[in-house]
Amino acid sequence: MFLLIASVLCQVEPVGRWFEAFIKRRNINVSASFQELEDEKELSEESGDEELQLEEFPMLKTLDPKDWKNQDHYAVLGLGNIRYRATQKQIKAAPYEILSDPVKRRAFNSIDPTFDNSVPSKSEAKENFFEVFSPVFERNARWSNKKNVPKLGDMNSSFEEVDAFYSFWYNFDSWREFSYLDEEEKEKAECRDERRWIEKQNRAARALRKKEEMNRIRTLVDNAYSCDPRIKKFKEEEKAKKEAEKKAKVEAKRKEQEAKEKQRQAELEAARLAKEKEEEEVRQQALVAKKEKEIQKKAIKKERQKLRTTCKNWNYFSDNEADCVKMMEEVEKLCDRLELASLQCLNEALTSTTREGGKAAVVKQIEEVNEQIRREKEEAEARMRQATKSSEKSSTGGGGGSKNWPEDDLQLLIKAVNLFPAGTNSRWEVIANYMNLHSTTGIKRTAKDVINKAKSLQKLDPHQKDDINKKAFDKFKKEHGVVPQMDSAAPSERFEGSSLDSSPWTTEEQKLLEQALKTYPVNTPERWEKIAAAVPGRSKKDCMKRYKELVEMVKAKKAAQEQVMNATKVKK
């Protein structure tokens, strides 16, 4: 069902582009539509632009479309002056297949033929570092993936700014890639395997070029860092700072040591004053004790004189001269033995009594003193007997008593103990065999006898040990005092002269001789002169004789050890 609406007359005002086109047609007396007019205008403009471009860029007529890889695409577009800084809008204004594709454009930008890849050398930047390196870094900043690339700065840049600059470039993240220089295009491959092979070759070539590029950047940064005067300044400042800190530490340590030394000196001074005070107190006490002793000594002397005078006045309580002399001796004994208090008591008793009473008091005191002397004498004799008994017991415990060990055997034992030190295999059997071989007494010794006697010698008083050693040395001088000579032969080189040096060899001299024997072997010219020069205080003759004695001792030692080993084998 349709509703019929009555027509309404409306008044409108003509506007818009269609009305504008109508007005233009009416003014130029044409009947063409607006769209036709626009198309004709665009065609005329394009033909005019094409003619203009061909006239302005005659190079375009010479380019071969097949050789597109070797062409400068920015120059083709007429953007050679702005190149990589051209915006997408500018490129769209001049359409081109390579630069309109962002991936292909980046590939072409990476190998921009106008880019300067050179790196300044260290010698170029000696005088004008910033003028040389600043444009190079600005030029290479285009490859950074990160925005806001830090500037090189100037001499007034802070340490933080310089450190941030070199940290950025040492960790430079470059987007530059070299796919544009691929020698083969995988699109031209006939099969999948060939495409894979082409991709593999291209990846290897790109990686190599990328490595070379990063080495170039690293060389640039290294050269700049080594030539940067700010780095040298910072290093000098750091060095000066460390020197100042070191100096401050040394100064602090010195002050600390001075404080410790001052404290130590104060403690020493305090200790010295305390010691002086103590010594002064001891000295005062000694003076007081000395005074008291002198007073006591004077008092004793006075009491002794008083006792003597009293006894003398009473004619020593006897009319017989012999008894008087005997009593005089006893009185002197009392004066020597009695203390001050006893003398005072005795003198008081003598003063307040008669002659007979005084005699009885003196005789009683004499008997007490004599009894004390007798007890002291008995105690001393008992101690002497005990000491003698202990000495006899210790001496008889060493294998048959002292009678079985004459002086010669004791000296031979001491020599054998020194000749065969601790650590020698079957040491005491070897010492016993050595003594049995060299003893002149004919007494056979066992290892047990030798051990017991060695222990008893260790317990001897040091004076007794010195006495035994002295006797042994006197015997050595007596036996070796004169060197026997042949009747008509000249003295040999080994025993020149008529007497030997009596001083024994010390341990230090023995070590020097052994070292010299090792240093100068048998085939050394003038060997013994050099050995004697190496042992201060010893002549050539002394060294040769000592060497002979050592050889004989070694031979005797080996013989004793061999005898013990043979005896052990026989027992087994």
Image (spheres, rainbow, N blue to C red):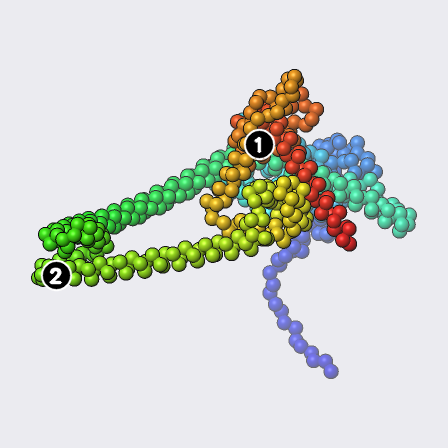
Q: Is residue 372 visible?
A: yes
Give the crowd class for mark 2: few <14, some 14-19, many >=20 residues within 10 Å. Answer: few
Give the crowd class for mark 1: few <14, some 14-19, many >=20 residues within 10 Å. Answer: few
- Residue drawn at x 65%, y 44% is 442
- Residue drawn at x 64%, y 34% is 550
Quadrant assignment, res 141? top right
Q: Which residue is mark 2?
A: 356
**Amino acid type at image mark 2:** Glu
Task: List x then y, in percent, for residue 316.
Answer: 15, 53
Q: Is residue 349 left or right of residue 162?
A: left
**Amino acid type at image mark 1:** Glu
Residue nearest the viewer, comparing 7 with 233: 233
Task: List x then y, in percent, for residue 338.
Answer: 21, 56
Residue nearest the viewer, comparing 473 with 426: 473
Q: Which residue is mark 1?
A: 479
Q: CA distance from mark 1 to mark 2?
A: 74 Å
Q: Is residue 498 left or right of residue 366?
A: right
Q: Is residue 301 left or right of residue 124?
A: left
Vertical placement of residue 347 versus 253, above or below: below
Q: CB atoms at circles 1 and 2 under 8 Å apart? A: no
Q: Is residue 125 visible?
A: no
Quadrant assignment, res 412? top right
Residue 282, numbered circle: none
Tag 2's secondary structure?
A: helix
Q: Nearer the viewer, mark 1 or mark 2?
A: 2
- Residue drawn at x 65%, y 55% is 17
Task: List x then y, in percent, for residue 528.
Answer: 63, 24
- Residue drawn at x 17%, y 50% is 321
Q: Quadrant of the N terminus?
A: bottom right
Q: Residue furthest bottom?
A: 1
Residue nearest the viewer, comparing 237 with 525: 525
